[in-house]
Image (cartoon, helix red, strand yellow):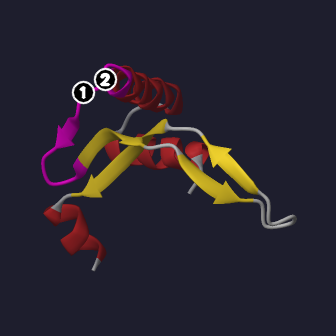
């Protein structure tokens, strides 16, 4: 499912117009992004939680040449599915 299909599904499920559903999705995305940038954790009970964790710098290997390369440290976004979401999927 891509963004346009998600907006269509949100509009059909909620009775909103596609434009309103698109604005709601963008607002949700912006709110989550802003909170994660601050280092906050977002927890949606039953759905799951978003958090940021730090990935340490490490040494990798170029698969073409076999030469060692340095991979910089960075922050990565994690999502852990909630029990309700997991049970509905299975």
- Whole-percent x, y for residue 83 in the image: 15, 64
Q: Is 5 left, or right, of 77 in this rendering?
A: right
- Whole-percent x, y for residue 41 in the image: 22, 34
How many marks can you see?
2
Residue 27 part of the magenta-drawn span? no
Quadrant of the image occupied by residue 21:
top left
- Rounded to the nearest angstrom, the CA distance separating label 1 from label 2 is 5 Å
Q: Secondary structure at mark 2?
A: helix
The residue carrying mark 1 is 40
10 Å crowding of disc 1: few (<14), some (14-19), many (20+): some
Taking depth in this image into account, of 21 and 66 the one nearest to the observer is 66
- Whole-percent x, y for residue 47 in the image: 22, 53
10 Å crowding of disc 2: few (<14), some (14-19), many (20+): some
- Whole-percent x, y for residue 77 in the image: 41, 42
The residue carrying mark 2 is 35
Q: Quadrant of the C terminus?
A: bottom left
- Chain part drawn in magenta: 35-48
Q: Is 51 left, or right, of 72 in this rendering?
A: left
Q: What residue is shown at x 50% (from left), y 30% (from top)?
A: 22
Q: Are marks 1 and 2 in contact (CB under 8 Å)?
A: yes
Q: Earlier in the sequence, mark 1 or mark 2?
A: 2
Q: What residue is shown at x 86% (from left), y 66% (from top)?
A: 64
Q: Is 13 left, or right, of 56 in this rendering?
A: left
Quadrant of the image occupied by residue 50:
top left
Taking depth in this image into account, of 53 and 27 the one nearest to the observer is 53
Q: Quick check: 69 above or below 51?
A: below
Q: Quadrant of the N terminus?
A: bottom right
Taking depth in this image into account, of 54 and 38 the one nearest to the observer is 54
Q: Secondary structure at mark 1?
A: loop
Q: What residue is shown at x 43% (from left), y 32% (from top)?
A: 25
Q: Quick check: 88 above or below 53?
A: below
């Amino acid at each position: 499912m891509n963004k346009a299909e998600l907006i269509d599904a949100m509009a059909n499920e909620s009775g909103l117009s596609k434009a309103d559903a698109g604005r709601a999705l963008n607002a949700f995305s912006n709110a989550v992004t802003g909170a994660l940038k601050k280092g906050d954790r977002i927890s949606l009970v039953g759905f799951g939680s978003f958090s940021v964790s730090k990935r340490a710098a490490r040494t990798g290997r170029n698969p073409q040449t076999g030469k060692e390369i340095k991979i910089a440290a960075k922050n990565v976004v994690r999502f852990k599915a909630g029990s309700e979401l997991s049970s509905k999927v299975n």
